[in-house]
Amino acid sequence: MDSLSGAGPRRARGRLGEASPGARAAAAPWARFSAWLECVCVVTFDLELGQALELVYPSDFRLTDKEKSSICYLSFPDSHSGCLGDTQFSFRIRQCGGQRSPWHAEDRHYNSGAPVSLQREPAHYFGYVYFRQVKDSSVKRGYFQKSLVLVSRLPFVRLFQALLGLIAPEYFDRLAPCLEAVCSEIDQWPAPTPGQTLKLPVMGVVLQVRIPSRVDKPEYSPPKQCSHESLLPTPVVLASVHELDLFRCFQPVLTHVQTLWELMLLGEPLLVLAPSPAMASDLVLALISCLQPLKFCCDYRPYFTIHDSEFKEFTTRTQAPPNVVLGVTNPFFIKTLQHWPHILRVGEPKMSGDLPKQVKLKKPSRLKTLDTKPGLYTAYSAHLHRDKALLKRLLKGLQKKRPWDTQTASLRRHLLELTHSFIIPLEHYMASLMPLKKSITPWKTPPQIRPFRQDDFLRSLEHAGPQLTCILKGDWLGLYRRFFKSPHFDGWYRQRHREMAHKLEALHLEAICEANIETWMKDKSEVEVVDLVLKLREKLVQAQGHQLPVKEATLQRAQLYIETAIGSLPKDLQAVLCPP
């Protein structure tokens, strides 16, 4: 099955090696597998080469040399981490073969129903890693070192970590035959369909997951165990395919959660230095998730090393630091990125009384070299006051030994309410820019969406601002002014404007279909009728590509109008518009 469109196929042949002109057919080899994963990689340590790619499965999946190199380096903790035993973490790399085409059928179907923050990555790969390092006297260096890596364009970190937890230990014992069997099982899975609860059998276990949908309510309850009508074993129910344990990830920075939320909202460059790839990648992914349901529009690398192909690009001092969140473990980055405005260093989790030991807010001038102490090094002053009630609630939860998932739910709810309070005024103002339905007439071009005027919006906050839904005080106007300069405002505005433009087109199509076309055609020239046919066809193509929110009855009526209009034209024009 072709894995890329427009950038050359990544999978050139079927399972048996034969060329396949019908590679996009439902029965194509690895079609179901590639709905979840791009490939599975095994990275090992070679005495002469260092990290080396031992295996890629399916074997005909094509990775560029740069992608192979990135996967090799990012699949092993660097020497500063000292990870013994088993560890899991994640990374994200730029796809080198060009961006995957947005009209690719699988992507369009999934993305149209998925929340924007969980859509497939068009130009990046996620790598989900299970690394094992144990003493082994039979190996020259005295250690067995190997990583199993799942490469995907889906940000389903919880699901893929759970999957690795099942297959990696077995693979390290039995090697290749086990991996081939697992990939064949994944190739039988149903496609990830937003809003559906799926059962995914693998290695004698059934994982039960629900794929989030964009119409879900903010706090969707975890999936319940389905009744068993088959002979499958009792499923292991995953509460989420993508949500991490926020409370665990944010343990050392609970007192600065709101400041970090603001930095994420504004798309500020942030370096996260942690003791291990697991801590670094989980903290970066937790920070990114702070903005949900907003899409994170900047770059981010949950785990990054000095060997990465973008190292020079991210560390240059000849221009302003890029809008990226980097997770690292090598203290060398503190020296290299001293010019970055925000650096967060966390240590191993420690308790200080009843509360996890918190990092302190420090000025960037306090940054030393490699021995810099844990802290959030920034000159940034938060616009909003800290929510002391949240911290009290979390502290009380620790004292009463509440389950961590309860603490995480409390923290996630707080961040969700904060993001909603910030976005709702923007949504209301944006909706006011939409032309009224009564101004949309069938035979005229629909009116334009009015421009977004920042000053008008800021004036509207006095009576329709975040204070209506959020108790937090502070400089909300200052926060909005900085937000307007961030990549996230640009990303949000473009998406909302596109959705509104599609809605406008849909309303116009409905207006045409509710009008009497035969009355309209009576005094129209052939050129005007042909123009209507072409415009209706264009709208039908858009609607059938799920870009216009219209009912099936409207589409059928539009098709009937096209046929009626063509039927009124001379035979020679009919032949041009409807060639045999």
Image: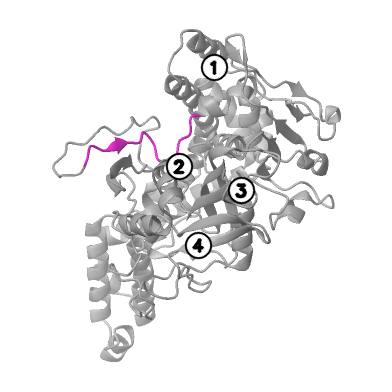
Q: Which residues are magenta?
A: 233-245
Residue 235 among magenta residues: yes
Q: In the image, what residue occupies the spot 61% across and 23% down? A: 349
Q: Residue 61, how many percent across, how many down?
A: 47, 67
Residue 471, numbered label? 1
Q: In the image, what residue occupies the spot 38% across and 76% down? A: 528
Alpha carbons under labels 2 and 3: distance apart: 16 Å
Alpha carbons under labels 4 and 1: distance apart: 54 Å
Asked if the residue at tag 2 contacts the one at tag 4, i.e. Cβ–Cβ closer than 8 Å, the answer is: no
The residue pinned by badge 4 equals 55
Return the disc, 1 or 2, that comes first in the chain's sequence. Answer: 2
Alpha carbons under labels 4 and 3: distance apart: 15 Å
The residue pinned by badge 2 equals 161
Amino acid type of disc 2? Answer: Gln
Figure quadrant of the N terminus: bottom left
Q: Residue 565, how many percent across, how many down?
A: 27, 75
The residue pinned by badge 3 equals 76
Q: Residue 92, how many percent across, how many down?
A: 58, 50
Please indicate whether residue 37 sits to the left or right of residue 96 in the image: left
